[in-house]
Image: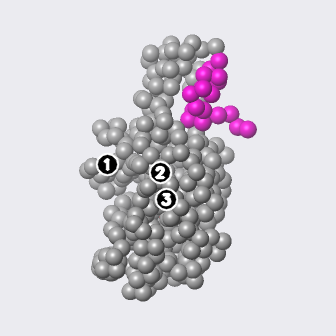
């Protein structure tokens, strides 16, 4: 196994790794990582020689390739290179009342949803706990530079978190136990991997669950979200109901609006009906489809997005339109491809 990086180890493992170091020194290192979110060289309460040694023994997992900023400085996208050369992205979004870090759980993704840039690029590998947690640490560091505190973490970057549930869960525990984020401010988004949802149901912390639905009948969903063939809608709804029964949380259904494909009046009726089946706590999040190079179909017009929201509400569903962030730096939902070339469709917009 590769040597651990600085956020791979938990507190006890850090003490073991720094065997022979006095306890108070280990605490200082831990505070550098989990309270200050700084580099070993900044830990000036430690002797200089020790800082240099720590920098070597606790290497960073993420090597910054580029940092792009948009929305007047309120959205920042980081492109990282990982050990072995794969690349992933992390997005920090500052809002007036909160700051959210959107993190990746895999390099690439095997789920192959045609409208998603990550899906178009295919799967490379799972991320480790250290690679996941360090993305949050870097988001916190960057937010602090703007005098902001990160309040929310969403597993909505590259990859399918529930296909890497073990590492994702260890990361959730670290975010909760060591960084101090409450479970209700952590959201795991999934295409609907039922065994993964069942595992989350059995885990102790009540994180929020977001389901990338995009279609409310199996025929259309088989096409848009291919894993639906393995985990069809009826079974998925049962897993959602069971999750809610245990966690007393709200589940959200994500719905990227694709013109003429899933934005018809009949889609609104079906979706509303589906969301009411998981009563009473489903919230539909409408995402205007963001452009990706490999998908020919365009997003619904802003007018249609709001009409669709109103239709859902008329049918009794709870629905909102997601504020779009980072489209001009390819940082919006479904646009993360880590600079990978994706097959260009001839029908490109
Ligand atoms: N694999 C997980 C985590 C990624 S979350 C999941 O799919 O839930 C990324 C979200 O953006 C998902 O809801 C995804 O369906 C949505 N998305 C993908 N491509 C998109 C696009 N082109 N426009 C808008 N949303 C998109």
* Foreground: disc 2 or disc 1: 2
* Of pointers 3 and 1, the one earlier in the residue sequence: 1
* Segment tinted magenta in the rendering: 1-19
Whether residue 39 is visible: no
Q: What type of secondary structure mainly makes up the magenta span?
A: loop
Secondary structure under the numbered disc 3 in the rendered image = helix
| Quarter of the figure that contains the N terminus | top right
* Foreground: disc 3 or disc 1: 3
| Location of residue 17 (image quadrant) | top right
Instruction: Kindly identify which residue carries mark 1.
Output: 98
Instruction: Kindly identify which residue carries mark 2.
Output: 207
* Of pointers 2 and 1, the one earlier in the residue sequence: 1
Q: CA distance from mark 3 to mark 2?
A: 13 Å
Check residue 111 in the rendering and tell me which mark sits there, or answer none.
none
CB contact under 8 Å: marks 2 and 1: no
Q: CA distance from mark 2 to mark 1?
A: 17 Å
115 with respect to 324 (left or right): right
Residue placed at 45% from the left, 49% from the top?
186
Give the residue at the far left of this rendering: 96
Tell whether position 349 is magenta.
Answer: no
Instruction: Kindly identify which residue carries mark 3.
Output: 245
> Badge 2, how many Cα within 10 Å: few under 14, some, many 20+?
many
Give the residue at the far front of this rendering: 245
* Of pointers 3 and 2, the one earlier in the residue sequence: 2
| Coordinates of residue 328 in the picture (x, y in percent) | 38, 62
Q: CA distance from mark 3 to mark 1?
A: 28 Å
């Amino acid at each position: 196994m590769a040597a651990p990086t600085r956020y791979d180890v938990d507190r006890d493992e850090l003490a073991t790794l720094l065997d022979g170091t006095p306890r108070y020194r280990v605490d200082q290192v831990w505070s550098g990582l989990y309270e200050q979110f700084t580099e070993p060289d900044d830990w000036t309460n430690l002797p200089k020689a020790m800082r240099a040694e720590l920098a070597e023994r606790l290497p960073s997992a993420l090597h910054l390739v580029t940092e792009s900023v948009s929305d007047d400085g309120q959205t920042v996208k980081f492109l990282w290179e990982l050990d072995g050369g794969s690349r992933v992205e992390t997005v920090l979004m500052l809002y007036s009342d909160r700051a959210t870090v959107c993190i990746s759980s895999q390099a690439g993704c095997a789920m192959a949803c045609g409208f998603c840039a990550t899906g178009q690029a295919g799967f490379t590998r799972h991320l480790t706990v250290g690679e996941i947690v360090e993305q949050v640490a870097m988001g916190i560091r960057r937010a602090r530079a703007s005098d902001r505190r990160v309040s929310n973490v969403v597993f909505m970057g590259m990859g399918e978190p529930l296909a890497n549930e073990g590492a994702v869960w260890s990361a959730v525990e670290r975010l909760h136990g060591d960084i101090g984020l409450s479970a209700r401010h952590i959201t795991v988004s999934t295409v609907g991997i039922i065994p993964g949802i069942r595992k989350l149901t059995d885990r102790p912390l009540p994180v929020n669950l977001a389901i990338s639905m995009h279609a409310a009948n199996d025929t259309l969903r088989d096409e848009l979200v291919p894993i639906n063939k393995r985990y069809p809608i009826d079974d998925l709804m049962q897993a959602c109901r069971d999750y809610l029964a245990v966690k007393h949380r709200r589940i959200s259904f994500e719905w990227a609006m694709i013109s003429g494909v899933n934005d018809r009046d009949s889609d609104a009726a079906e979706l509303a009906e589906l969301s009411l089946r998981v009563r009473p706590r489903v919230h539909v999040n409408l995402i205007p489809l963001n452009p990706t190079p490999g998908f020919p179909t365009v997003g619904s017009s802003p007018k249609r997005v709001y009409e669709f929201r109103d239709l859902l509400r008329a049918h009794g569903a709870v629905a909102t339109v997601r504020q779009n962030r980072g489209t001009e730096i390819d940082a919006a939902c479904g646009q993360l491809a880590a600079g990978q070339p994706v097959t260009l469709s001839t029908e490109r917009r």
